[in-house]
Amino acid sequence: MYIVIRSYDLIPGTREEFVQRVQERLVPLLNHVPGFRAFTLMEAGDNNVTFISTFNKFADAKASARLTQEWHTEHLNVFIQGYTRIAAGEVRVQQAWGIV
């Protein structure tokens, strides 16, 4: 399993519109990426959000990263004020509770 993490510093006052746009437009696109498993958007401060996307294979994560970057450039740049941080890699340890 592989994850891609992106963190964005947003222009103050734009977080809710950013989150809505991601939920309504980006997440449905990710649902069509082969190997897509999960997407999480976390508020990491007043003007910061972090995406965590999970995929079955590295190739799936790379395909998602390309799709997300293209979509991000076209639809999200108007919300972003600072450097976007990106990390990707293989999940080596995972523990889930309550899953049988």
Image (cartoon, helix red, strand yellow):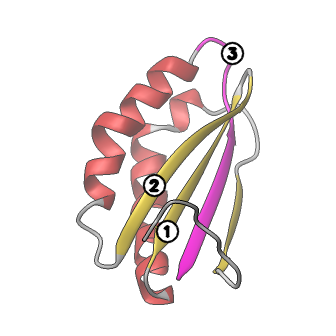
Give, as a three-letter code, the residue at label 3. Answer: Pro
Nearer the N terminus, badge 3 or badge 1? Answer: 3
Q: Residue at x 35, y 47 (%)?
A: 26
Magenta residues, start to end: 1-13
Q: Nearer the viewer, residue 90 or 71?
A: 90
Marks 3 and 1: CB-CB under 8 Å? no
Q: Quadrant of the C terminus?
A: bottom left
Packing grade of label 3 (10 A; few <14, some 14-19, many >=20) is: few
Q: Name the residue carrying label 1.
A: 54
Give, as a three-letter code, the residue at label 2. Answer: Phe
Nearer the observer: mark 3 or 1; the answer is: 1
Give, as a three-letter code, the residue at label 1. Answer: Thr
| Residue 76 x, y percent position in the rendering | 48, 37
Packing grade of label 1 (10 A; few <14, some 14-19, many >=20) is: many
What's the CA distance linking mark 2 and mark 3? Answer: 24 Å
Marks 1 and 2: CB-CB under 8 Å? yes
Q: Along the horizontal axis of the image, is 30 left or right of 97? A: left
Q: Residue at x 45, y 87 (%)?
A: 57
Residue 12 is marked as: 3
Q: Along the horizontal axis of the image, is 52 left or right of 68? A: right
Residue 9 is marked as: none
- Residue 63 colored in magenta in the image: no
Q: In the figure, 34 relative to 75: above or below?
A: below
Residue 39 is marked as: 2
What's the CA distance linking mark 3 and mark 1? Answer: 28 Å
Packing grade of label 2 (10 A; few <14, some 14-19, many >=20) is: some
Q: Residue at x 51, y 87 (%)?
A: 58
Q: Nearer the viewer, residue 95 or 77?
A: 95
